[in-house]
Image (tube, helix red, strand yellow):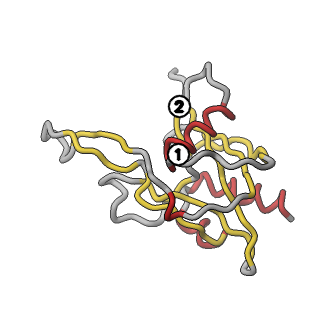
Amino acid sequence: MTTPKRSAGLLLHRRTEHGVEVLLGHMGGPYFAHKDAGAWSVPKGEYEPDEPAWDAARREFQEELGLAPPDGEAVPLGEVRQKNGKIVTAWAIEADLDPATVVPGTFRMEWPPRSGQLQEFPELDRVEWLSVDRARAVIVPAQAEFLDRLLEHSS
């Protein structure tokens, strides 16, 4: 049996006159280009077993958004297991940032498939503040649990 891959990330949230909003990223690359539902995620990334999840969450925030992770109280949201078997750990931090300041990291992959051509794509092709209801409609399904846990904590 193989050990499942693990990712860690930070779920930023802010309070507005319309309620709580969360910062999610739309996954970059050709597979998600024309998808909305299930194509948004907490900014996160994979890490090795010898790296603490908290350190990985902060590092991945920096890599994915090109911005330093915000200071503030980090509320553990625990883990979820995605359909692909990956275990994701997240923390919530109340903070605000302007999505226009995001400079996403990139990844390389062969595209089109079996073409032998490597192309570079953004890790996240856009980052937006979404209401919790809108976030629930578009987030990777297993990560919706993080939204529930955030609301339980902030109520």
Please tell me in which quadrant of the rendered image residue 113 appears: top left
Q: Which amino acid does the dot numbered 2 rest on?
A: Lys
Image position of 119 (left or right of 106): left
| Proximity of marks 1 and 2: CB atoms separated by less than 8 Å | no
Name the element at disc 2: loop
Report x, y in % for residue 132. Answer: 67, 69
Q: Which amino acid does the dot numbered 1 rest on?
A: Lys
Query: In this view, which residue lies farthest toward the left?
Result: 115
* Residue at 45 percent of width and 61 percent of height: 126
Image position of 119 (left or right of 38): left
Query: In this view, which residue lies farthest toward the bottom?
Result: 17
Quarter placement of the C terminus? bottom right
Report x, y in % for residue 44. Answer: 56, 44
Would you place residue 114 above or below residue 135 in this image? above
Residue under label 1: 83
* Residue at 54 percent of width and 37 percent of height: 86
Please tell me in which quadrant of the rendered image residue 68 appears: top right
Would you place residue 94 above or below residue 81 in this image? below
* Residue at 83 percent of width and 61 percent of height: 154
Residue under label 2: 5
Name the element at disc 1: loop
Q: Sequence order check: which comes first, mark 1 or mark 2?
A: 2
